[in-house]
Image (spheres, rainbow, N blue to C red):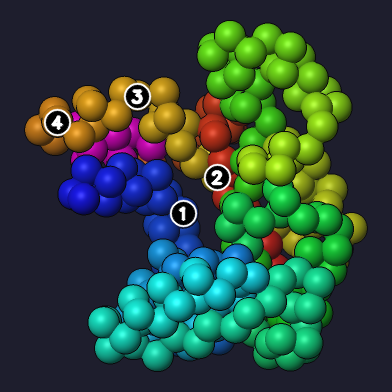
Amino acid sequence: MASREQRGSVRTAVVWDTLEAALADGPRDVVDLGGGTGGFAVRLAESGHRVRVVDPSPDALAALARRAQEAALDVTGLQGDVTDLVEVVGAGTADVVLCHGVLEVVDPAQALARIGEVLRPGGLLSLVVGQRHAAVLARAMAGHFQQARGLLDGQEPLDPRTGRRFTAGELASLLTAAGFESTTVHGVRVFTDLVPAALVDLEPGAAAALVELERAVAGRAEYLPLATQVHVLATRA
């Protein structure tokens, strides 16, 4: 359990750094789209934010309810997805929307349009997506050369499990078309997915040192193509 939590902390540290800094000025109304069992929602609620999780899985929402109850927190779970997001949470009711690991498996233009509808003017979108460059590298290193070649130009068929991958330039275009203005772009998991898990789990101090390394390169443009994920903060016009 400790090892899994340790690896999870390494993978999300950069996202948390950016998100908590952006929300530091007071409680917000937060919608976590596809938030599942509440990995982000519970921690945000602990910080005083009012959080609603929208997810299509009743099992995930049940686990979220148990997790929130154990922590004595008020987190609302709502069954829904991108298509009925506005009906589920209401138009113009959110200061912040988290969309982490969702854009890969839905219609991205539709998702950003719906998110724009539920955000108040000037509201914040936290978007985390898988990046194509790193996915090409990972497939090639695993010996899946045809998959790497197909993904290189974005022509690989959609994988039902992992979904699409995006470049930072594609994200910027999608966000602009949906009426968002990007404020920060960070690389997430630049090195973490390349480091053997046993090293992080067993070597004293390795996890903390890896987190610091990830933080050091997260904002450096030259390392962005190596990042497994891209984290963008964007505001609604």
Disc 3 residue type? Val
Mark in the foreground, 2 or 3: 3
Q: CA distance from mark 2 to mark 4?
A: 28 Å
* 10 Å crowding of disc 2: few (<14), some (14-19), many (20+): many
Residue carrying label 4: 202
Do residues under tags 1 and 3 come within 8 Å of each other at their CB atoms? no
Residue carrying label 3: 195
Q: CA distance from mark 1 to mark 4?
A: 24 Å
The segment highlighted magenta reads 206-214
Name the residue located 81 percent from the left edge and 72 percent from the top edge: 83
Q: Residue furthest front?
A: 59
Q: CA distance from mark 1 to mark 2?
A: 8 Å
Q: CA distance from mark 1 to mark 3?
A: 19 Å
Residue carrying label 2: 186
Do residues under tags 1 and 2 come within 8 Å of each other at their CB atoms? yes
Disc 2 residue type? His
- The quarter of the displayed image where residue 148 is located: top right
Residue carrying label 1: 15
Name the residue located 78 percent from the left edge and 83 percent from the top edge: 86
What secondary structure do most residues of the magenta stretch adopt?
Answer: helix
Disc 1 residue type? Val
Mark in the foreground, 1 or 2: 1
* SS for dot 2: strand
Q: Position of residue 85 (x, y in %)?
A: 74, 78
* 10 Å crowding of disc 4: few (<14), some (14-19), many (20+): few
Name the image quarter holding the C terminus. bottom right
Does residue 1 appear anywhere in the picture?
A: yes
Which label's residue is closer to the chain start, 4 or 3? 3
* SS for dot 3: loop
